[in-house]
């Protein structure tokens, strides 16, 4: 397995944020970083640029500039790749065997969420590796693009009814590499009327639902804190629909991690992951698991 971190670049500010995030993960994991630029081809075979932000000096200059932004570290091995073809197929092929595939996505503005096109959705639904969609941070926040200005927090959304060791392992390793705290949240769905309307939940019922779900969450996490003792872990059961819970909880996080079950169906992103990818106001990792 050619272990590495792969970042797709196109010269846009969102691409810079993705490359910077990927570089930090690669450095912490002692892995090389591959920066991949893909030029799709017209039916005639004439290559067209992925982004109008590409500099006039050509793709080689773009890759060089991207590789030497804020993410430069003397001990980080950076590989640069320029390819032509269908971006979906090329990036899936380049990500094969990698630790993760990192993409950029710009925020929608005051409404929050991501601008994520068909390419990002396709990769998140099809890749065999975790796909990280990095939101471009504003430099006005006081830090470099893609860099949190506070102690980083990662949020893991966990379905306690399904075992997901690959998902949990990724979350702990990502938090360990970033020196981040890890908040693990399970959603407890309230009762519903026959027409699928939620029943208002009293404070007493809320406590009962939380207590009912907590043992399953604790069983799912047995042994993980001991395996990663340096990761500070906080767990919670939150009453509500899973996608709404995670979007709300993600407002205080730097990265929200959700799973995509391979066994649900071929190339199926899932309703919860789909909602989080589009509406969470922070970066998102979609992790395939059995």
Image (cartoon, grey):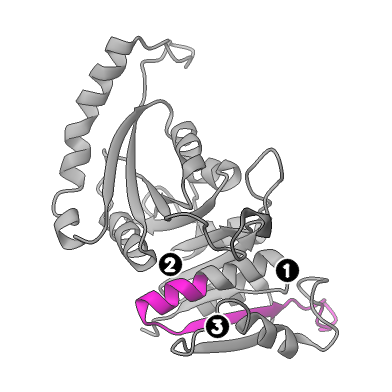
Q: Residue 5 vs residue 103: left or right?
A: left
- The residue shown at (40%, 82%) is 31
Residue 56 at x, y = what percent?
86, 84
| 11 shown above or below 131 | below
| Secondary structure of the residue carrying numbered label 3 | loop
Which of the numbered marks, if any, corresponds to residue 12? Answer: 1
Judged by depth in the image, the label closer to the viewer, 2 or 1, is 1
Disc 2 crowd rating (10 Å Cα; few below 14, some 14-19, many 20+) is many
Tell me the magenta residue range: 22-48
Q: Are marks 2 and 3 in contact (CB under 8 Å)?
A: no
Question: Where is residue 88, by image quadrant?
Answer: bottom right
Q: Position of residue 288 (x, y in %)?
A: 40, 58
Q: Can residue 97 be seen?
A: no
Of the image marks 1 and 3, the number of the one nearer the N terminus = 1
Read off the residue under disc 2: 129
Residue 101, above or below 110:
below
Q: Decide which of tag 2 and tag 1 comes sooner along the chain.
A: 1
Tag 2, which secondary structure?
Answer: loop
Q: Nearer the viewer, residue 238 or 289?
A: 238
Does 222 appear in magenta?
no
Seen at 51% across and 76% down, the residue is: 6
Other-residue count near label 1 (Cα within 10 Å), few / some / many at <14 / 14–19 / ≥20: many
**Residue receiving disc 3:** 72
Count of marks overlaid on the render: 3
């Amino acid at each position: 397995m050619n272990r590495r971190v792969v970042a797709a670049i196109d010269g846009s500010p969102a691409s810079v944020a993705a490359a910077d995030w990927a570089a930090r993960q690669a450095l912490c994991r002692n892995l090389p970083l591959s920066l991949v630029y893909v030029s799709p081809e017209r039916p005639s075979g004439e290559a067209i640029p992925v982004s109008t932000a590409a500099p006039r000096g050509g793709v080689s200059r773009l890759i060089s500039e991207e590789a030497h932004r804020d993410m430069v570290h003397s001990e980080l091995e950076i590989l640069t790749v320029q390819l032509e073809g269908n971006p979906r197929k090329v990036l899936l092929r380049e990500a094969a065997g990698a630790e993760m595939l990192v993409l950029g996505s710009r925020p929608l503005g005051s409404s929050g969420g991501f601008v994520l096109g068909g390419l990002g959705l396709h990769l998140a639904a099809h890749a065999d590796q975790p796909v990280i969609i990095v939101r471009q941070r504003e430099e006005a926040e006081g830090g470099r693009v893609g860099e949190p200005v506070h102690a980083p927090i990662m949020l893991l959304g966990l379905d306690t009814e399904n075992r997901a060791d690959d998902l949990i392992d990724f979350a702990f390793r990502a938090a360990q590499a970033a020196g981040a705290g890890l908040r693990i949240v399970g959603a407890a769905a309230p009762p519903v009327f026959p027409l699928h309307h939620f029943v208002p939940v009293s404070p007493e019922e809320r406590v009962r639902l939380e207590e009912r779900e907590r043992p399953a969450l604790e069983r799912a996490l047995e042994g993980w804190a001991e395996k990663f003792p340096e990761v500070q872990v906080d767990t919670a059961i939150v009453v509500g629909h899973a996608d709404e819970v995670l979007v709300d909880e993600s407002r205080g996080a730097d990265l929200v991690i959700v799973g995509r079950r391979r066994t649900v169906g071929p190339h199926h992103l899932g309703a919860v992951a789909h909602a989080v990818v589009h509406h969470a106001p922070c970066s998102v990792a979609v992790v395939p698991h059995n």
